[in-house]
Image (cartoon, helix red, strand yellow):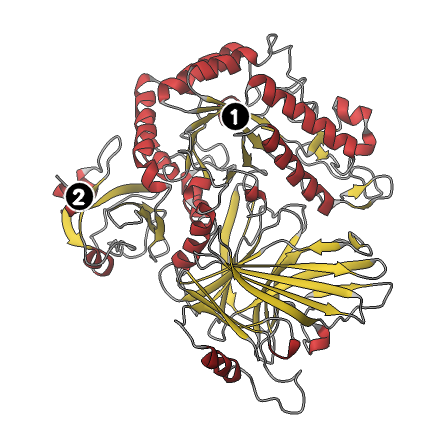
Amino acid sequence: MTTVHLRRGGTSVVVSLTEGRLPRILHWGRDLGSIPAEHLADLELATRPKIGDSAVTYPQPLPLLPQVADGWLGAPGLAGSRDGRAWAPLFLVTEHALTDDAETKAAVLVVDAEDTASELGLSLELRLEPSGLLRTRATLRNHGDAYRVDRLELALPVPDRATELLDLTGRWAFERQPQRHPFPLGRWERESRGGKSGLDAPLVMLAGEDGFGWRTGDVWGVHLGWSGNQVLAAERAPAGSRLLRGGELVLPSEVVVERGGELVSPWLYGSWGAGLDELSGRFHAFLRARESHPSSPRPVLVNTWEAVYFSLDLDKLLAFAQSAANLGAERFVVDDGWFVGRKDDSTSLGDWIVDLDRLPSGLEPLAERVHELGMELGLWFEPEMVNLDSDLAREHPEWIFDAGHGPGLPSRYQHVLDLGHEGAYTLVRDRISALVERLGIDYIKWDHNRVLTDAGHSPTGAPGVRRQTLQAYRMMDELRAAHPGLEIESCSSGGGRVDLGVLERTDRVWDSDCNDPHDRVDMQRWTTLLLPPELQGMHIGSEESHTTHRVAPLEMRGATALWGHLGIELDLTLLSDIELAQTRRWVDTHKELRPLLHSGVTVHADTQPEVRLEGVVAQDGSAAVFQYVMLDRPTTWPPAKMRLPGLDPDRLYRVEEFAVTAPLPDSQRPPWLEAGVTLTGRMLAERGLEAPSLHPDRSVLLSVRAVDLEG
């Protein structure tokens, strides 16, 4: 009898490898402490149910890869066949190894298994990272004739007290909206079929104790590190098992493993916590520990898109760049519209050649000036897309995806360039690479605006989504290898490609095309469920939002964009001196707070529906900054007290308003805010502070500092 115990970051994972069966997780969650080997065996025995007339009928721990031949009546972890044979494999473990990764300090369990009758081999890898984040993946090996795979989906168990589900949905410019409901019998499944994780992506599939929140209730969640078609699911069997699952969503005949070949699944990430803050904190700590995580301060950028759209000319861009440098910007990004013929979004996509009609001297004078001003240069590309009205499409119509009915429906007048054609891949990669080299481009904004609903690879029309995803990864990897230091942003109609697969080769994501702070507050909050603030692009947009037409003052726009990778999306050449000075103060404030915001612990208070209270607390508890937001008018008044989470309970803190350009009006200031207060972290979390009398879509920032640091 073999049972192993993995412990890291306040997490225990107990895995049974008895009877030659695939690994079954007996416990995943709170640290159980040191357990002697003989008591691990007792734990395995304690979790084994009494089996009556049929193992199918009674609950039992399920393996990471649920198997039909093992008595599982739900969706099998592996679905496939070899011309109708080997469709119900039964893998038996041949060996396992438990090691410590010397570089990452993760606990690593690798299990090898075989099914000789099916001529298949399987390896399962579990890694418990120092943050307490668990991740797992499978490698399927084929020893026989070609094997078609329809599903390879891993599963992590959650306890029976996980009675409620939460995941995210959304649409363009309104991404990551939460939805929750009881954990039903059967399978709650969220599919992404657009060739990317999607604007309506669930992001993380969560199951927890009834009513769990940011600070309360044990909760478990899984995320798939993959940027193509995928599925996340929660499954509950009548026999009692509760699983969180994830894997690629494979199109017909898209994955065929030849004799001697193998298929490696994406990583399925699992996190748990006493509340969502602790769960998300494990993701954040894992990401920040990566060797590839951005290590330099995230440069404040200015982006041309909402400022000027397609109206680009050299004089305008040079004036814009000068204003950006005066503002304190550290990166200048030229968005869509710089390439030949691109006067609107109906033409020229795919022709990555600078438009010499509008920019007779090319982009070189701008690149030279941007670098002279001490800023980095960024440029927008959409490498996977093409307009039918383009030289590329006219010369190579066979390079456009076609499932048998032509190029399909346009979206933003565009179609998908099939990078599975090596000629298409090479042309796009080489044109981008040449521009990066020639102009000294430091940063690529990589967009992706059309879903892959009809992605047929010519001439056969066979599904090409999976290969497209791998080719996009390959191009990003090759560009970064060829140009060390090049940074890439994952943008996809805004937040349509936000996942840990693309973030293995990018440096930030664009949360949403919507800069309206009213909507941004929650979109950023829920993106933080997976990503720390420094990986999220947050921009100060126009007073009147270009997507919702709400009007918001600079105080609200600045306070909402402050937290992440700050950007400005205003036409700086049109701002008054007063507006420029006020915007400059927000840039300066961000730079002042950046070391804290991009290294601290992100926290959220559980509040009434109309209110948001969240912040970042320094790792050592010495300082924090919070934003209190009134999104709508509460039914009851005054609103609930501001209870500040995440502080050291036994430490004294000085709490004051953090006024960037102007303090709150007297009519909105509670008495304590006049001179500030000094209270313990416990008092601030339990009793809280009287809330200011804010109007809707207004906020206040709070500075919190341990008093032992004053003076």
Furthest toward the top, the residue is 360
Q: Compared to 300, does 120 lie above or below?
A: below
Q: Which mark is residue 442?
A: 1
Front one among 324 and 147: 147
| Image spot of residue 69 (x, y percent) | 73, 76
In which quadrant is the C terminus drawn?
top left
Front one among 283 and 214: 283
Circle 1 Cα neighbour tier, 10 Å, few/some/many (<14 / 14–19 / ≥20): many
The structure residue drawn at horizontal position 66% and vertical position 33%, both measured from the top left corner, is: 412
Q: Can residue 685 be seen by looking at this rendering?
A: yes
Circle 2 Cα neighbour tier, 10 Å, few/some/many (<14 / 14–19 / ≥20): few
Front one among 399 and 45: 45
In which quadrant is the N terminus drawn?
bottom right
Q: At label 1, which amino acid type do we have?
A: Asp
Residue matched to label 2: 709
Residue 313's quadrant in the figure?
Answer: top right
Q: Compared to 87, does 337 lie above or below?
A: above
Q: Compared to 399, does 643 lie above or below?
A: below
| Image spot of residue 357 (x, y percent) | 64, 10
Residue 344's quadrant in the figure?
Answer: top right
The structure residue drawn at horizontal position 79% and vertical position 33%, both measured from the top left corner, is: 399
